[in-house]
Image: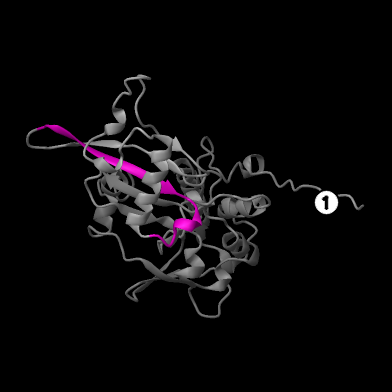
Amino acid sequence: MGLWTRPLPDGPFAGQSLRDLHSGAPRPGVAALARAGAGTSGSSGVVVTDRWGRSATHDAVVVTCQSWLLSARIDTEEQLFDHPTWMAMDRSHYAQSSKTFVMVDRPFWRDRDPVTGRRVLSTTLNRPHDPRHLPARRRRRRRRRARHHLPVLHLERRRPEVAGLSTDERVRLMVRSLGEVYPGVDIASHIVGEPVTVSWESDPNFMGAFRGALPGHYRYQRRLYSHFVRDDLPPAEQGLFLAGDDISFTPGWADGAVTTALNAVWGVVRHLGGSTHPDNPGPGDAFADLAPSTWTPPSPAPP
């Protein structure tokens, strides 16, 4: 929201925010991407069509969505990416994550066990990839300036066997599992609200919690991360830049989104004929020295 509302400090649009430049609202979701000029192979701009059928041609486009959307939900012209890049996107691996949130009467996990002196409950890992987090968020009432707790029991399952279970069934399963770890804590008695489940792999715009490279996937990761350096790409693939945490080397974290965004900005500036200041080179200017390694493991010796 800060990036959306903060006035630009200088340049031709100084004093205006992105919200001002977009008439107060973001544009609709993208439905199609194509090269301007049907049948042309030159870099003549990219046509972006939104979900209401309105099209506009842009000299440069930065794509920050989950990369699978380019083949699953956005009608993307094949020639905008070469085959190795399409293959890198298609073979990306995304982790499952299904989170269930349950409101409780109070942050009871902060109670102290009279015998051990420790808290009766804590962040728990029981069975592979089954974390339980215990956030107690504070909300401030503006009028009375009084604070009250909004305690939430956060239950998470990353295993596919719960995909077909209802939210209530998931809560019963996970509360029972926690009861085996903390037999002296009646967790169910503290539940006061309807549980809510978010399954990232089932969300049409996420399709997974975050990308995670599997063994042998380094070449795909490098291909996507290095996409902003386009000197060796044909004109038909110019003007489109990938960014976002899912093409970075730190998927799921904000720093990966920020660094790939800076890479894309450098690529856009260069694509439009600009350059960085000699005293402040951009990531592409030093790419020969900073690029991810192209090393590949040697082939095994024949028997």
Q: Left or right: where does residue 102 sit relative to residue 208? A: left
Q: Left or right: where does residue 147 sit relative to residue 56? A: left
**Residue at the disc numbered 1:** 299
Outermost residue toward the bottom?
39
- Looking at the picture, does residue 223 appear above or below residue 290? below
Residue 74 located within the stretch drawn in magenta: no
Q: Left or right: where does residue 134 sit relative to residue 234? A: left
Outermost residue toward the right?
303
Q: Position of residue 130 (x, y in %)?
A: 46, 44
Residue 152 located within the stretch drawn in magenta: yes
Q: Position of residue 116 (x, y in %)?
A: 38, 20
Q: Position of residue 242 (x, y in %)?
A: 51, 56
In this picture, which residue range is highlighted in magenta? Answer: 145-165
- Looking at the picture, does residue 241 appear above or below residue 153? below
Q: Amino acid at mark 1?
A: Ser
Q: Quadrant of residue 88?
A: bottom right
Residue 288 makes an appearance in the image:
yes
Outermost residue toward the left?
143
Q: Position of residue 251 (x, y in %)?
A: 51, 47
Which residue does the image show at 91% across and 53% down from the upper left?
302
Which residue does the image show at 17% across and 34% down from the upper left?
148
